[in-house]
C-alpha cells in the first residue's frame, strides 16, 4: 500500500510542525480575543443586571412614594370635604334661623302696618265724617 520513505516522513513532520506553528501563532491569539470578548460580554451583562435591579428598586420606591402621596392627598381631600360639609350644615342652619327671624319680623311689620293703616283709616273716617257733617250743617 503505502511505503514510508524519507520524503513522506519529512512531509508528515513538516505538516505537523506547520499545524503546531499555526496553532501557536493564530489559534492562541484568536482564543484570547474570543475569551476576552466573552468576559467583556459577561461583564456587560452583569452590569446590565445590576442596573436593572437598581432601576426596579428605584421604581418600587417611586411607586411607594406615589402611593403614599395619593393616600395623603386622599386623606387631606376627605378632611377638606368633611370640614366643608360641617361648615355648609352650620351655614344652612344659620340661614334657616335668619329666614325664620326675617319672616317673623315681616309678620310684625305687616301687623304693625295693618294696625297703622286701620288707625289711619279710622282717623280719616272721623275727619271725613266731621268734614261731611260740617258741610252738611252749612
Image: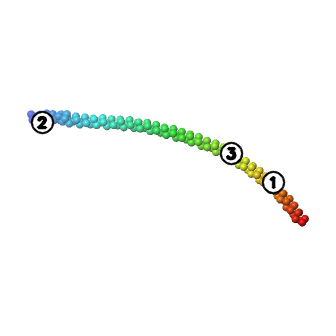
Q: Say which of marks 1 and 3 sits in front.
A: 1
- Check residue 94 in the rendering and tell me which mark sits there, or answer none: 3
- Work out whether mark 3 precedes mark 2 in sequence or the reverse, and give the earlier one: 2
Q: Residues within 10 Å of mark 2 (few under 14, many from 20)?
A: few
Image quarter hosting the C terminus: bottom right
Which residue in the structure is indicated by mark 2?
Answer: 11
Residue under the point 44% across and 39% down: 59
- Disc 1 designates what residue? 115
Q: Is residue 3 visible?
A: no
Residue 28 in the image: x percent, y percent? 22, 34
Q: Residue at x 57, y 42 (%)?
A: 77
Which is closer to the viewer, label 3 or label 2? 3
Image side of residue 125 versus residue 70, left or right: right
SS assignment at label 2 = helix
The image quarter containing residue 117 is bottom right
Say whether residue 113 is left or right of residue 31: right
Quarter of the image holding residue 131? bottom right
Q: Quadrant of the N terminus?
A: top left
- Give the Cα distance between marks 1 and 3: 31 Å
Where residue 80 sits: x, y (%)?
59, 42
Mark 1 neighbour density, 10 Å: few (under 14) some (14–19) many (20 or more): few
Amino acid at each position: 500500500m503505502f511505503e514510508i520513505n524519507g520524503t513522506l516522513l519529512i512531509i508528515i513532520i513538516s505538516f505537523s510542525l506547520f499545524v503546531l506553528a499555526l496553532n501557536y501563532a493564530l489559534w492562541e491569539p484568536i482564543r484570547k480575543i474570543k475569551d476576552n470578548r466573552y468576559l467583556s460580554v459577561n461583564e456587560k451583562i452583569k452590569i446590565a443586571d445590576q442596573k436593572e435591579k437598581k432601576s426596579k428598586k428605584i421604581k418600587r420606591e417611586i411607586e411607594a412614594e406615589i402611593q403614599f402621596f395619593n393616600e395623603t392627598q386622599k386623606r387631606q381631600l376627605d378632611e377638606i370635604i368633611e370640614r366643608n360639609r360641617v361648615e355648609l350644615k352650620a351655614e344652612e342652619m344659620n340661614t334657616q334661623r335668619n329666614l325664620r327671624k326675617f319672616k317673623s319680623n315681616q309678620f310684625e311689620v305687616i301687623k304693625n302696618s295693618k294696625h297703622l293703616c286701620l288707625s289711619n283709616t279710622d282717623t280719616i273716617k272721623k275727619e271725613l265724617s266731621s268734614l261731611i257733617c260740617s258741610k252738611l250743617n252749612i
